Image (cartoon, rainbow, N blue to C red):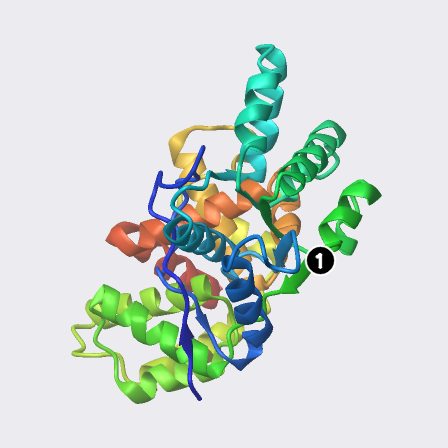
Amino acid sequence: MPVSALISPLGEGSFALKFSREATGSGRFFAGPENALLLRAVDDFCAGPACPYNPLVLYGPAGIGKTLLARGIAARVGATQPGGCIVYLTGADFTAEYARAIETRSVMAWRHATRSATLLVLDDVGPLAAKRPAQIELMRTMEAVVGDGGQVLVTAPQAPGALSEFLPALSGRLAAGLAVGIALPGAGARRAVVWQLAAERKAPIAAEAIELLADELPVVVPELSGALHELFARCTSTSTQSIDRAQVRSYLSKRRAIARLTVREIATCAARQHGLRVADLRGPSRRQTIVTARALAMYAARQWTGKSLGSVGKYFGGRDHSTVLHACRKTETSMATDPCVRQSVTDLRAMLQNG
C-alpha cells in the first residue's frame, strides 16, 4: 500500500511573525489512504486564494501531526508565493500577545501586523477556550484577512462544532470553510514512520520487527517514537545486535499489561522513583527535580493509560492540556538525546510492571 510523503516542517523562524520552538519529532508527515481527504485539502489550500474553502481547519488529538502539517503548509505557501506575508502564531501566543498589546496600548500596531497576512496560521486554538475577548479578536482578525483576499489555516483539538467553550459565532466561522479530521496513521503509514525513525536514530531493527510494531500499535507518531526509544534502550543495555521480532512481541505484551494502570498508580511510582511525594508532583512547586519528575509522570500517564491531556492535567493539580502537552513533548525530545531520561522511562515501566 503506497504511502505519500508530505511536506517538511517550516524552518524555525522562517515565514513567521512569531514561531513556536516546540520540537515536532519526525520531519515528514506520512499519509496513507486513511488521510486521502486531508492530502487533497492541503493540495487545494496550497494552490492559493483560488482555493474554494477558507478557512481550512485541521483537527485531531495531540500527537496526530497538526503542528507538523501547519508548519509544512506555511513552508509550501511561502515557497510558492514569495511575495506574501505569512503570520504563524500558536493559540497561546495569540492570546498572550493580544493581552500584551492591550496593556501596552499597542493594539492598532499589533492588529496591523496580524491582519496584513496573506496567510494566517493559528496553530492550536485550544488555549482560547473560555477567553471571550481573544475569541472575538480572532474572529475579527480572520474576517479581515479573508476580506483582503488572504487565507486562514487553523488547527484544533476537535471539530469546530465540538469546541464547547467557544463562541457560537467563532465556531460557525471556523466551520464555514472546510474542517478535516486527521485520522490515525494506517498500518502502511506507521511502517513508513517507524522506518524513518529507526533510520534517524540509527537504531538497528529487523524488518519483521518493524512490521510487527507498526501493525500492533495503532497510535500517533510520538507513541511510536517512544516505543522505538524503549526498544533501542533495551537493545543497548543487553548488548543485543538489533531489535528483533521476539523483543517487540515481549514489549507489546508488557505494554498491554501496563495499559490497565491508572494515573494515580503512575504518579505514585514516579514520585517514589525520584524520592518525592505524590503531593509534590500535584503541587505548584517549580523546583527542577519536581518539574522533571512531574513531566515524566505526565508523559507516562498520557502514553500508558490513554487518558486525555485534560484528564492527566486535572490529576496533576488542575493543569491545563497545553501544560501536559508541553511536558510530554519535552520528555519525548529528551528521550532522543539524553540516555538518563530514556533510562528513567524504562525504569519507571519496570517498577510498574513489578508492582
Could one spot residue 224 in this view of the protein? Answer: yes
Residue 209 locus on image (x, y percent): 33, 84
Question: What's the amino acid at mark 1?
Answer: Ala
Q: Determine the residue positioned at 61% across, 24% down.
A: 98
**Is disc 1 surrounded by few (<14), some (14 to 19) or many (20+) residues within 10 Å?**
some
Vertical order, 177 against 18 (above or below) = below
Can you give x and y, in whole percent of width and height, for residue 158 in the image? 68, 56
Q: Which residue is mark 1?
A: 159
Residue 172 x, y percent position in the rendering: 79, 49
Quadrant for the N terminus in the image: bottom left
Q: Is residue 159 above or below residue 97?
A: below
- Where is residue 122, by image quadrant? top right
User: Percent x, y for residue 323?
Assistant: 54, 40
Residue 288 quadrant: top left
Number of numbered labels in the structure image: 1
Q: Is residue 108 above or below residue 145?
A: above
Left or right, 350 with reference to 139:
left
The residue at 21%/76% (across/down) is 204
Q: Looking at this rendering, what residue extends furthest in the right direction?
A: 168
**Residue shown at 24%/70% (left/top)?**
199
Q: Report the front residue among 288 and 27.
A: 27
Classify residue 67 as left or right of residue 131. left
Vertical side of 200 occupied by 171: above or below:
above
